[in-house]
Amino acid sequence: MTDKAPTAPKIALAPRTHTTPPAKFSHGVRKGNILQVAGQVGFLPAEEGRPPTLAGPTLREQTLQTLANVRAVLEEGGATWDDVMMLRVYLTDVDHFAEMNEIYDAYFEEQGLTQPPAARTTVYVGLPPGLLIEIDALAVLG
């Protein structure tokens, strides 16, 4: 029989601003100093009785709201953008890459990072109709 050291609990992160996920997953999970944010999209903060609503039809509106949604999960888990090691950006249209980079760069210029920016990968995917972008993040705290 081996002695197994106790491990940190795995904590589900569910900001008040987020709707219930459409399947059995968490918006984010933290275990010890590792925090993983599930893929977020550009839905506006949840309101009682209102179905999930996109921030708007444009890439700009959806990207900014998606980043706000990622940030909300990070903050729920005690993290900031400075703790993020990796961001993955999922775009539905290769032609959106340059515009997304402009929006992304301007957003992070405003965030006042004190650490180097996160690593990033961008891939092209199919998303449900109307969705143009999805972003997930991995953060390490402490």
Image: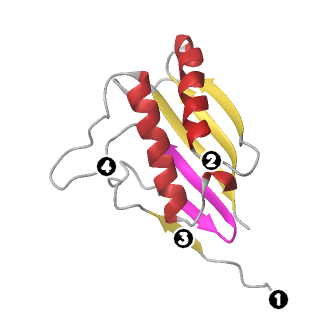
Q: Earlier in the sequence, mark 3 or mark 1?
A: 1
Say which residue label 1 marks: 3
Q: Residue 142, position in %: x, y?
A: 74, 68
Residue range highlighted in magenta:
29-40
How many angstroms separate mark 3 from mark 2 (CA)? 28 Å
**What numbered label is drawn on residue 45?**
4
Q: Residue 100, position in %: x, y?
A: 54, 23
Q: Secondary structure at mark 2?
A: loop
Q: Identify the residue at image location x=71%, y=43%.
A: 118
Q: For residue 42, which quarter of the picture? A: top left
**What numbered label is drawn on residue 11?**
3
Disc 3 marks a residue whose amino acid type is: Ile
How many angstroms separate mark 3 from mark 1 (CA)? 24 Å
Q: Earlier in the sequence, mark 4 or mark 1?
A: 1
Viewer-closest of 24 and 40: 40
Q: Earlier in the sequence, mark 2 or mark 1?
A: 1
Viewer-closest of 34 and 24: 34
Q: Secondary structure at mark 1?
A: loop
Q: Earlier in the sequence, mark 4 or mark 3?
A: 3
CB within 8 Å, label 4 to label 1:
no
Q: Residues within 10 Å of mark 1 (few under 14, many from 20)?
A: few
Disc 4 marks a residue whose amino acid type is: Pro
How many angstroms separate mark 4 from mark 2 (CA)? 24 Å
Q: Identify the residue at image location x=31%, y=34%.
A: 54
